[in-house]
Amino acid sequence: MGVTVLSEFNSLPKNLRCSYRLQENSFKARERNIPRLSSPKVYLGEKMEKLPHPRKTFMFKQVIVARADLKMSPGKLAVQVAHGAIAAAEKTREKNREWLEKWLKEGQKKVLVKVNDENELLALYEKVRGTGLVGELIQDAGLTELPPGTTTVLAIGPAPNELIDKLTGNLPLF
């Protein structure tokens, strides 16, 4: 089941759309009466759902725990977090599809927190395994900044907030 986020921009009449490219008369776009766009919509299979308002209370989330001691570059950290997010979501699809679908429908809340070192990360992983939640450890391939096999992040969930918060609620944001 693929997820595609769309803007309501495409549903506007063509005469109300404005191009993102600079054109001769682009300065006139400000003068047009272009309606404000509401929140984006998401396709879940065949059904189109409106994404929640940003201030909505989420019931599900995914938490990615990264090691602070590795001093990864921002790009490296982003890639490791992405690997973890995808791996954990796919494992949740197998283990608890209902949680995954609810999380997708809500807008896929993710939180990035940190631990000091690998020992803390592995200790947290053991706690996650004891609860039955999905926890995916990511190890780097070693092609750029880190030695091969370096454990970089732990992705937990998606799962109900209260279950994840019992394990990660005390960790600082990255």
Image (spheres, rainbow, N blue to C red):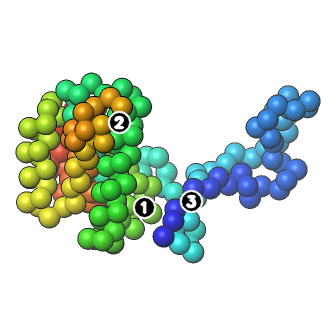
Q: Position of residue 50 (x, y in %)?
A: 55, 61
Q: Residue furthest bottom?
A: 46
Give the residue at mark 1: 104
Kind of residue indicated by mark 1: Leu
Mark 3 crowd level (few <14, some 14–19, many ≥20, 10 Å Cα): few
* Residue of label 3: 4
123 to the left or right of 59: left
The residue indicated by pointer 2 is 143
Element at label 1: helix
Between the C-alphas of marks 3 and 2, the distance is 31 Å
**What residue is shown at x 32% (from left), y 29% (from top)?**
145
Q: Earlier in the sequence, mark 2 or mark 1?
A: 1
Residue 159 position by quadrant: bottom left
Which residue lies at the image location 30% right of the left edge and 71% below the top edge?
94
Residue 112 percent across, percent down from the top left = 30, 39
The secondary structure type at the circle numbered 2 is loop
Near mark 1 (Cα within 10 A), the count class, few <14, some 14-19 or many ≥20, is many
> How far apart are labels 2 and 1 at the CA level?
32 Å
* Res 146 quadrant in image: top left
Tell me the CA gap for discs 3 and 1.
11 Å
Q: Nearer the viewer, mark 3 or mark 1?
A: 3
> What residue type is disc 2 on?
Leu
Sooner in the amino-acid sequence: mark 3 or mark 1:
3
Say which label, 3 or 2, has the lower sequence index: 3
